[in-house]
Amino acid sequence: MKRVYVNEQWCLGCHLCEYNCAFANSGMADMASALKGKPIYPRIHVEEGEQISYAVSCRHCTDPLCVKSCIAGALHMEEGVIEISRDKCVGCFTCLLVCPYGALTPGEDGIMQKCELCLKNACGEPACVSGCPNRAIVYEERGAAT
Amino acid sequence: MKNYVIIGNAIAATGCIEGIRSVDKEGKITVVSAETRPAYCRPLISYYLEGKTTVEKMSYRAPDFYDKNGCEVLYGKKAVKLDAENRTVSLDDGSTLPYDEVCVAAGSSPFVPPFGGLDTVPAKYSFMTLDDTLALEQAITPESRVLIVGAGLIGLKCAEGIRERVKELTVCDLADRVLSSILDSECAAIMQKQLEDHGIRFLLGDSADRFEGSRAYMKSGEVVDFDVLVLAVGVRANTGLVKEAGGEVNRGIVVDTRMRTSLPHVYAAGDCAEGEDITFGGRRVLAILPNASIQGRCAGVNMAGGEDVFDKAMPMNSIGFFGLHAMTAGSYYGEAEGGMMFEERTPTKLKRLFTRDGLLTGFILIGEPERAGIYTALIREKVPLKEIDFDRLKKVATTTVFSAEERRKKFGGVV
């Protein structure tokens, strides 16, 4: 299965992925009206250390703790992709307490949201990847890092 | 073809079904369900009262779950006897189920202390099941004065759930602070203030001495008149079946890391089980949903002849009240026990990290839930703090504290 991976040596820390993500999941047709002058709630975020930066979104773990821990039965796995039924989520933040990557965040409404690889929105493939100016985020098939 | 029996039909039972079916697609699975409905998300009962979910949405799995997994569910039936020698479970309707492997996922029951005069209280409720919740919902009106006995997780979530639906709400607890099982005094005071700011009154370090109808005479001398009483003092693991069958039982049914009890072919999982807490160095009943689902699945896989081990259990809770979240995990060791505490605070946030022997053993985060799982993972995986930039981690939960090699492993491939 294809997943999103990051090449931290190429990440500029420009945060464009966050904007592309928020726009892709806004359901709106134009970026300015979707994002301009508003706080954004992306499903990817740039981690910044002293010398490094890289984007983190859901790893789509093969044995996901978030799915097993969800008290609302809202998180589930569909053919390897971890999806959330936002109508079932109550915003208890248990998934946030267990995700080792800090990959889940609440949306504007306090209900959790997460990367679903843009498979179900208008993009069809991860908007963070296609919009990354330096190919620091890629969408590809890999095995475990050894 | 193997014959599986699961006693109980909540989260651990669901995990057990899925665990069995991940290994064995053919075996017969019979589920003994005391409650008359499919598995539902028990921790959501307070959210239901608050209007944040519905009975339909609270269902833990899709409506066709049992059919798809080839399970027969015996609704409204209780297991009354486990015969580990002859491998049978007797039910309250007089029938007997033979099994090859059985999982006891019987949960826990509300513990009601012997308050004097409790039998004279006309409107009293527990807060454990959806049926309890629907009955409580029927009993309250916008004019109700409610007394909740117990300022733990259950009592306070109940309080939050009904706050906007009743007139007066008083919570009492013998402990001198709220949420005493997961918060220290200072953190508890912050949460208490949040609850008080939303109109909940507390009587702490106090308990009912006796009841007379709808009046509680407190030990402190205070008298509380109420219309509805909620008993949320605590719960006890349902251990009886295994105990009477001769299995090892402590506060819960004693299990190993494969969820095996001391009896052959008998497994236990969820709120009735007592397994190792990795932050505590001993066994504990960890009555939290993630534990139930993981233990249930682990039991199921092993029952079906597969191999699964769950050796990373620890207490953890994410609990919010009126928008203020408290996240807790692990154990908090004081200086006398060789522990150290690091604290970060702002006017609206409080973070406490507890370490011992170079490991993170626990934390309390109030008002700062972001990426808390990074801290949890350090406890779960017992990551030596000297291998990461712990000084940075004290300030902010970030994966940048890991070495380049660790980051490559975490983000460079399938996990």
Image (spheres, rainbow, N blue to C red):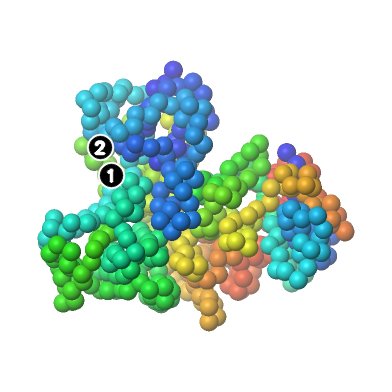
User: Does residue B254 appear in the picture of this structure?
Assistant: no
What distance separates the C-alpha of mark 1 from that of mark 2?
Answer: 8 Å
> At 43% across and 43% down in the image, what residue appears?
B40
> How packed is label 2: few (under 14 Cα within 10 Å), some, or many (20 or more)?
some
> How packed is label 1: few (under 14 Cα within 10 Å), some, or many (20 or more)?
many
| Most foreground residue, B357 or B161 | B161
Q: Is residue B176 above or below residue B60?
A: below
Q: Residue furthest top?
A: B1
Q: Report the number of numbered marks.
A: 2
Disc 2: which residue: B241
The image position of residue B106, as x and y in percent, is 33, 40
Q: Residue furthest right?
A: A133
Quadrant the N terminus of chain A occupies: top right
Q: Quadrant of residue B277?
A: bottom left
| Most foreground residue, B3 or A71 | A71
Q: Are marks 1 and 2 in contact (CB under 8 Å)?
A: yes
Disc 1: which residue: B238
Q: Quadrant of residue B279?
A: bottom left
Secondary structure category for the residue under label 2: helix
> At 79% across and 63% down in the image, what residue appears?
A33
- Read off the chain for label 2: B
User: Does residue B264 appear in the picture of this structure?
Assistant: yes
Callout 2 amino acid:
Leu
Q: Residue furthest bottom?
A: B347
Q: Is residue B127 above or below residue A81?
A: below
The image position of residue B301, as x and y in percent, is 48, 33
> At 40% across and 52% down in the image, what residue appears?
B45
> At 69% across and 48% down in the image, what residue appears?
A116
